[in-house]
């Protein structure tokens, strides 16, 4: 078990490393130059100054040398400083990460709280109008892009109810109510597809379980339907739902980039969005490492949960 | 309340424990609604072992499931199941739940998939007890250990914590039996309980069922396709063919002198050590007709060597005395009076035919 966790963590480091290298290289393919972007509006800037700044940022080195320097520093926990604000990337990320985690957690919570009952009802009232309606809603939930849903929510709430989220972001410590009001719409927009996927997966998984032999055997014992469904049905059908949830984390993290920008939430998503625009390489890479690590860690937790749910799953040495 | 037994056999005036009366079961298929069970009637007396035999698809498992209303995808379209002064066909969900597992318990064909894989077996036995008995978790657990011991699970005190995947098929069926007996039911329905097991294990499990049946004074409704099992276990035999009863009667009499060509054929298809190994195995030609296109008249007609023009009419169940019944025109006129019927020798060459 411990060996399994250690091995998975090492794989995780490798995965995050490879992703970082990939993003490092792809970033350089984007046309545009951080120095020229920064100095674009400064009056009387000559080629000499541009060269000087390029050298100061280390961008005059060959690409592979830059990569080696970056990776070496990163392994020591140093992700450099922002080209833009001159702040260390680690402290920028540390400041922004909790905000994004809160948004992500709210989105997942909405997805679970709405998706699980929907999927459950849908499976139990199989083929009823409720089931048909749920299937329609979940196809919509999966197909609608989250940023569009976000825009739609803001627009319609403002238009018909005259309500719009607060303009200035407040931390949960400063003003919890304002914070939650600010977060709720993007969390809804992000959570919609998670809700839809969970509902669909739980529905099909539970339907299959409810037709299995042991469920009939439990009914033959004289068990009431609530016991059949909750004790035996649901627990036997959650493993695929957990797998799905682990993968949904990727969607949610990706969704924060654009939704935070739309709603003016100063989290990691907004940070990476601005950094890409300004070709602020160290910040982009720092964010990518954190996003990757969060994804890998959550999926490790999901895999460990399988063993808690299902006694047949054991983590082999090899 | 004692009612005269309509068949007047054996114990005479004893009220049957279970009386299935003209039971019909239908299923929806892509080709339309079909009748899987077309008017089945039989009785089970207290402490009696009744075997229901027939080929796959004859409706025997469906009948067993229908009694406890555990059908999936099918529904009871007619008839009654009399139990304890109530009709289980029309009983509400609560009444049904009280009967299941407490009065009537069931064990299933495939022990590998009949236990919930996520809970220890002890938990699943305790669940069965506490669904019907108000006793503490601790007491139920002690009872579970006792039951495991009775069904022959070694080291039961440690085994209660085992998960189903840690047990063999035979052991799992023993656990299923323990669950079934948890509330001392008056009737145990066993749907091909040994089909999925090795032959050696099969004998042990059957012996166990018989032993516990005696100990718990439980009647047994045994669904099987194995004539050897019938001979071994049954007091009474009900032979199913294509959703109907074609013959029933006391086991010894039916097996000794069958009164329906289908029963005869089933019996001669059982290989014995005396069977000449050089010859092909005896089989019954053809297959059970599809439920969707059941021919008119006798349903066995197409496969029967004795078929004659009379068979295009549907034969009724002829009463042959002692409660014996046969759905064959050859028995017409031999009803009730115990008149000599065709000697078995007349039937034997036709019973099973060889295929090459």
Image: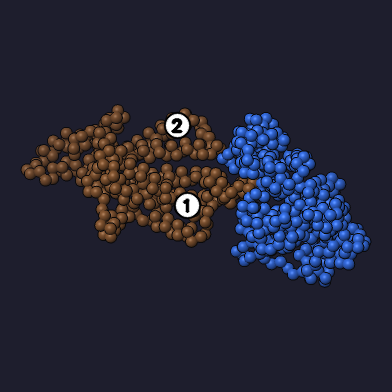
Label 1 element class: helix
For the residue pair A6 and B172, the one nearer the viewer reads as B172
Q: Which residue is at a point 56% across and 40% down the rendered structure image?
A: B118
Q: How many marks?
A: 2
Q: Position of residue A135 (x, y in %)?
A: 45, 57
Q: Which residue is mark 1?
A: A119
**Numbered tag placed on residue A5 in the rendering:** 2
Give the color scheme: rainbow, by chain, secondary structure or one colour. Answer: by chain
Left or right position of A186 against B186: left
**Numbered tag placed on residue A66 in the rendering:** none
Chain A appears what colour? brown
Residue at mark 1 to residue at mark 2: CA–CA distance: 32 Å
Query: Where on the picture, by quarter, is residue B75?
Result: bottom right
Label 2 element class: helix
Q: Which residue is at a point 81% across and 69% down the rendered structure image?
A: B311
Q: Position of residue A283 (x, y in %)?
A: 25, 38
Q: Position of residue B71 (x, y in %)?
A: 64, 55
Evaluate whether residue A285 shows in this view.
Answer: no
Chain B appears what colour? blue
């Amino acid at each position: 078990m411990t060996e399994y966790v250690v091995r998975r963590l090492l794989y995780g480091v490798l995965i995050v490393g490879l992703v970082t290298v990939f993003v490092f290289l792809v970033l350089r393919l984007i046309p545009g130059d951080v120095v020229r972007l920064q100095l674009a509006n400064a009056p009387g800037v000559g080629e000499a100054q541009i060269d000087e700044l390029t050298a100061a940022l280390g961008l005059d080195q060959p690409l592979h040398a830059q990569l080696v320097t970056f990776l070496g520093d990163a392994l020591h926990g140093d992700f450099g400083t922002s080209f833009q604000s001159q702040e260390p990337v680690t402290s920028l990320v540390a400041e922004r990460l909790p905000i994004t985690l809160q948004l992500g957690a709210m989105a997942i919570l909405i997805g679970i709280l709405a998706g699980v009952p929907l999927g459950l009802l849908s499976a139990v009232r199989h083929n009823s109008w409720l089931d048909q309606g749920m299937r329609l809603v979940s196809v919509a939930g999966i197909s609608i892009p989250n940023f569009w849903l976000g825009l739609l929510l803001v627009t319609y709430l403002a238009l018909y109810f005259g309500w719009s989220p607060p303009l200035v972001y407040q931390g949960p410590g400063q003003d919890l109510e304002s914070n939650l009001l600010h977060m709720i719409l993007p969390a809804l927009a992000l959570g919609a597809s998670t809700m839809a996927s969970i509902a669909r997966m739980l529905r099909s998984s539970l339907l299959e379980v409810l037709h299995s032999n042991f469920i009939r055997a439990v009914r033959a014992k004289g068990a009431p339907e609530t016991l059949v469904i909750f004790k035996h049905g649901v627990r036997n059908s959650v493993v695929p739902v957990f797998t799905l949830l682990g993968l949904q984390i990727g969607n949610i993290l990706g969704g924060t980039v654009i939704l935070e920008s739309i709603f003016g939430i100063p989290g990691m998503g907004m940070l990476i969005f601005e950094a890409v625009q300004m070709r602020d390489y160290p910040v982009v890479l720092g964010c990518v490492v954190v996003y990757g690590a969060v994804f890998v860690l959550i999926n490790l937790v999901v895999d460990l949960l399988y063993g808690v749910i299902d006694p047949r799953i054991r983590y082999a040495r090899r | 309340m004692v009612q005269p037994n309509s068949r007047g056999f054996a114990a005479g005036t004893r009220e049957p424990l279970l009386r299935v009366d003209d039971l019909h079961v239908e299923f929806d298929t892509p080709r339309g609604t079909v009748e899987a069970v077309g008017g089945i009637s039989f009785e089970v007396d207290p402490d009696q072992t009744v075997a229901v035999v027939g080929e796959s698809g004859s409706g025997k498992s469906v009948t067993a499931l229908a009694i406890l209303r555990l059908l999936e995808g099918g529904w009871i379209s007619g008839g009654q199941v009399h139990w304890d002064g109530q009709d289980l066909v029309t009983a509400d969900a609560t009444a049904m739940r009280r009967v299941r597992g407490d009065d009537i318990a069931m064990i299933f064909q495939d022990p590998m998939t009949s236990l919930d894989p996520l809970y220890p077996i002890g938990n699943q036995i305790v669940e069965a007890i506490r669904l019907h008995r108000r006793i503490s978790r601790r007491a139920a657990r002690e009872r579970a250990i006792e039951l495991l011991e009775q069904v022959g699970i070694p080291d039961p005190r440690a085994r209660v914590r085992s998960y189903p995947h840690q047990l063999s098929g035979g052991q799992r069926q023993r656990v299923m039996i323990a669950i079934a007996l948890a509330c001392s039911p008056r009737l145990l329905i066993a749907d091909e309980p040994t089909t999925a097991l090795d032959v050696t294990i099969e004998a042990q499990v059957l012996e166990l069922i018989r032993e516990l049946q005696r100990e718990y004074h439980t009647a047994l409704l045994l669904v099987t396709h194995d004539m050897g099992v019938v001979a071994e276990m049954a007091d009474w035999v009900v032979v199913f063919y294509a959703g109907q009863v074609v013959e029933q009667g006391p086991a010894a009499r039916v097996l000794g002198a069958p009164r329906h060509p289908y029963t005869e054929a089933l019996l001669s298809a059982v290989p014995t050590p005396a069977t000449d190994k050089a010859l092909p195995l005896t089989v019954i030609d053809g297959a059970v007709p599809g439920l969707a296109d059941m021919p008119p008249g006798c349903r066995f007609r197409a496969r029967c060597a004795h078929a004659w023009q009379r068979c295009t009419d549907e034969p009724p169940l002829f009463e042959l005395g002692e409660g014996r019944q046969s759905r064959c025109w050859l028995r017409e006129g031999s009803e009730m009076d115990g008149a000599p019927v065709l000697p078995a020798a007349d039937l034997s060459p036709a019973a099973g035919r060889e295929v090459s």
